[in-house]
Image (cartoon, helix red, strand yellow):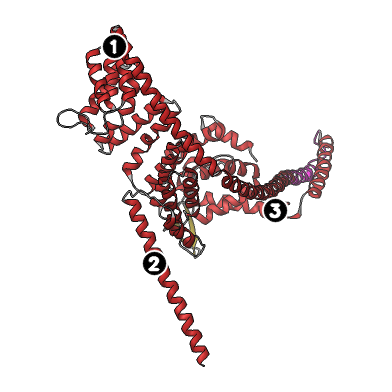
Amino acid sequence: MACGLVLTAALAAGITWAVRRDRAMHAALRELQEWNLADTVFRSDSVARVLVNYFDHPWHNANDQMLAYYLLGRAHADMGEAPQAIEAYQTAIERADTTDSDCDFRILRNIYGQMAVVFDAQNLPEDEIDVQKKYNHYSWMIGDTLEGLLGPLRLECAYYLLNDTDVVIQNAESARKQLLYYGYQENAALALLMPAYYFAVRGQHDEAKEAISIIREESGIFDDEGNLKPGKEMFYYTIGLYFDGINQLDSAEYYYRRVLAAGEFEAGYKGLLSVYSKRGIADSIAKFAPLYADANDAMHSEMNSAEVHKTASLYNYNRHMRQAQKERQEKQHLKNILLLVMAIVLMIGVIVYQAYRREKEEQRRLARDYYHAKEELEETRKEIEILREAADQWAGKEAMMKAKEHRLHTLQQQVTFLSSKLKESDIPNASSQESLSETIHHFHSISHPSSIIIDGQKSKHIQPRAAKAHEWKALIEQVRIHYPRFYLYITTEHSLSTQEYRISLLSRLQFETSEMSTLLDTSSSTVSNARKRIAAKLFHVESAADLDAKLLELQ
């Protein structure tokens, strides 16, 4: 008894500890996310790793798993470990359950956004474009209209690196129209920053002037005194390029010097060198040429140092990535085998289904030929009986009898042959034909006014009416059996509305327009117009008369 109490107490203590630990981990996850939202620069990945180790299990919520790996990626990104950051982001995306209604699509959207930042820093424009498009997609999904509208503009740097200036301008113009439509005037003006630069570089002076004017008046990046706000000074270079292009060199020099004052030496010296080259002032050219060269060399030296750092981080991570790649290849190999097996099974299924369809179509054709041969056989027998009862002295009787008997013999052979080829279930019989005739007769009767006799004395007037759903179903089934080619043609080979489909059936069975309008509860003009549309859809002809002729050709 005492032992049982001890075990129960130990179990309760264990459960209590597990619950407390789970609460502590969720609290730590929320706190780290709050730091992330506050743009805290992560100096260590230790906390994020603890959270990943705890939450990365199937019994934990998919959103918690995604968030833990996302925060680990943010830590790696802040620490300059690009490959580790990308791998953590990709794992976070894999953990997301997008089929769940509770999926946190905002976090998923932000993961793609952070991946775009890493790819941009690594000068990988194609990868940046790919993830940025996903960021834009989820922005619209979560209802973040402004981010969705700004999406095309976030692709500018990537397309700039790819030297695809036309796409940059097209995206900017498209985004600007949408931003104006939704009332984001400042953002719409900012969308012209890159186009203004390209217009100035290309010598499209009117377009550059208009863009610069809109940016000055509507973007909000200029202060009350007409100066660019801190961090936006490179736009002076675009203005300088514009004035340089229209040979207003004093204005161009003024703006290039403002670029220099902002610490953008490479752009500033390049602009001043252009101005003094046009003026032909040798001393100034001799002065600014080496300054531009030094600034250019310094910029490239800084870029080269960054490239060396990125290369080193990739090298240090290379072995891990190769192992991960090997595992992915093995999984992909297994997946490919399964897909191949599925493809073979599917192919066999398609072949079997096509063979089945061909067999059914052949049986329908044989059944149709069998019915027509049998019908003609019965007619021929009746004609022979009539001839036998005719007067003996009738000229040509014997010759006619011989011809009819020969035809009768031929038809008997044809019926015997067709019946041997047909399955018993596919052989039309008199009752099925009577069903078709009865159904057609029923449709004729309800489309015309009529009277019936009650108790041999009173007469009751019957009003015409539209056909009901079950009546249409019965007619369609009879048409399917007796006119299989026609049925397949209008059902599977063309896209007809319900009304057009029913009018096609009635037209094939040679109903009058007035009858059709009654059965469909619509006007005669509507039926006539529909028949013209059907003629165009089915046979590419214009008249209803051509439609009737074409329909009769389909058995």
Counting other residues with Cα less than 10 Å from the Cα at mark 3, is it few (<14), some (14-19), or many (20 or more)?
A: few
- CA gap between label 2 and label 1 equals 68 Å
Q: Is residue 326 above or below residue 184?
A: below
Which label belongs to residue 430?
A: 3
Task: Specify start and end residues of the magenta stretch as a single range.
Answer: 372-395
- At horizontal 60% and vertical 53% (from top left) the residue drawn is 438
The residue under label 2 is 24
For the residue pair 391 and 226, the one nearer the viewer reads as 226
Which label belongs to residue 284?
A: 1
Is 206 on the left or on the right of 539, as rendered? left
- At horizontal 61% and vertical 51% (from top left) the residue drawn is 478
User: What secondary structure is found at the residue carrying circle 1?
Assistant: helix
- Residue 258, how many percent across, how many down? 24, 24
- CA gap between label 1 and label 3 equals 109 Å
Which label belongs to residue 331?
A: none
Q: Nearer the viewer, mark 2 or mark 1?
A: 1
Is 119 on the left or on the right of 410, as rendered? left
Mark 2 touches mark 3? (CB < 8 Å): no
What's under tag 1, amino acid-wise?
A: Ser
- Closer to the chain start, of discs 1 and 3, is 1
Task: Note whether residue 459 is visible.
Answer: no
- Closer to the chain start, of discs 2 and 1, is 2
- At horizontal 22% and vertical 16% (from top left) the residue drawn is 251
